[in-house]
Amino acid sequence: MGSTARRHLPDAPFLAAARRERPSRRPVWFMRQAGRSLPEYREVRQGTGMLEACLTPDLACEITLQPVRRYGVDAAILFSDIVVPLKAAGVGVDIVAGTGPVVEHPVRTAADVAALPRLEPDGAAPVAEAVRLLIGELGETPLIGFAGAPFTLASYLVEGGPSRNHERTKALMHAEPDTWHALCSALADMTLGFLRAQIAAGVDAVQLFDSWAGALSERDYRELVMPHSARVLRGLADAGVPRIHFGVGTGELLGAMGEAGADVVGVDWRVPLDVAAARVGPGRALQGNLDPALLFAGHDVVEREVRRILAEGSAAEGHVFNLGHGVLPETDPDVLARVVDVVHAVP
Ligand code: CP3
């Protein structure tokens, strides 16, 4: 697989903020900006399964570009999913509409872990191709690649699907720590390979989603999860692209998630950004943190909240405006367009 020369985008506000330099304006993008809230997305997805769409380079490219065209956001995020490398490696997994990822044979024993397939370089080829297409289309807009962190991927594999309490996952972590670590180690290898393939193809930044890490105590996070996420993040250090690390409900984990090797720590809406800046400490930027549910509260509330977050975000060494979690499917795209306008208008 050939590697593309890294783009030089000295004026991109997103990259400047992520590097804690002075951006020309406050950058903004939205987690899940590509997807079901956009009519043009629903149109191009008709008749194509979610994972099939992710593994079809020209379709993934088009869907990635849709929110950039519509909103003028400061970054594109690759249209993909955290289970794509599992699928590409040959794990029986599908995304069921309205449910999320569902795993055919859950992974619960040492033998299940040993039987997990590896991600061969060819497996990432359609995603790398989508990245190359995007680099040719995006102009000066940076492209964010991403992957799921070992804990969040492990939760889907162990539970067999989405889980409210992660009880089987926590049982495995504590009752069979060797099996747990073997599973996370295999997933860290897969994630690292997948992100390296995206970087080689030209992404300008990466986000490691540990969406469900907030279900853990800080003690368990540090002992049983952080070493694996740290191996992924540190394994990308030499690539020189900003590394964003995000989870939901991670107020107690913000310091640890930064220490795991993030340049930018994603924050949900539960912790104000000035408080988050103190928890994360110096040397890191923040990303966040408008509650996606408040996008349904009307213009005045949205504008007030955006201004509050911009003010609180000024306490951080760098701030990338985002939601505290992904865009909800029923969100009115015009409200997101207005958020971008307000963020860009505030000096
Ligand atoms: O715009 C973007 O942010 C890029 C696209 C993106 C998707 N998934 C597309 C998607 C990203 C970044 C993800 C990451 C992802 N996938 C995460 C981490 C982020 C988070 O939300 O915490 C997680 C936990 C998943 C697993 C997953 N995939 C879930 C929970 C769901 C929702 C299930 C549902 O249908 O309600 C998915 C499906 C999914 N991933 C959709 C999209 C656009 C919806 C499926 C569809 O459009 O048919």
Image (cartoon, rainbow, N blue to C red):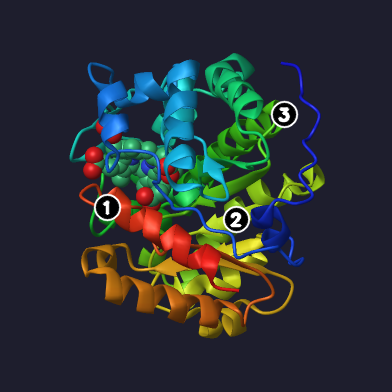
Report the Cα–Cα distance between label 1 and label 3: 31 Å
Between disc 2 and disc 3, whose residue precedes?
Answer: 3
Q: Which element is circle 1 on?
A: loop
Q: Which element is circle 2 on?
A: strand
Between disc 2 and disc 1, whose residue precedes?
Answer: 2
User: Mark 1 — residue?
Assistant: 328
Q: Residues within 10 Å of mark 1 (few under 14, many from 20)?
A: some
Image-quadrant location for residue 285 = bottom right
Q: Which of 120 and 245 lies nearest the eye of the viewer?
A: 245
Image height check: is 329 above or below 101? below
User: Mark 3 — residue?
Assistant: 200
Q: Which element is circle 3 on?
A: helix
Q: Where's the C terminus, which quadrant?
A: bottom right
Residue 157 in sight here = no
Q: Is residue 150 left or right of residue 37?
A: right
Which numbered mark, 1 or 3, is in the foreground of this view?
1
Tell me the residue at 64%/42% (across/down).
142
Q: Which mark is residue 121?
A: none
Q: Which of 223 and 70 lies nearest the eye of the viewer?
A: 70
User: Mark 2 — residue?
Assistant: 244
Taking the image as four quarters, which one is ligand 1 found in?
Answer: top left
Report the Cα–Cα distance between label 2 and label 3: 18 Å
Q: Position of residue 235 (x, y in %)?
A: 72, 45
Q: Is residue 224 left or right of residue 66?
A: right
Residue 228 in sight here = yes
Tell me the residue at 28%/63% (across/down).
295
Q: Which of 244 and 223 lies nearest the eye of the viewer?
A: 244
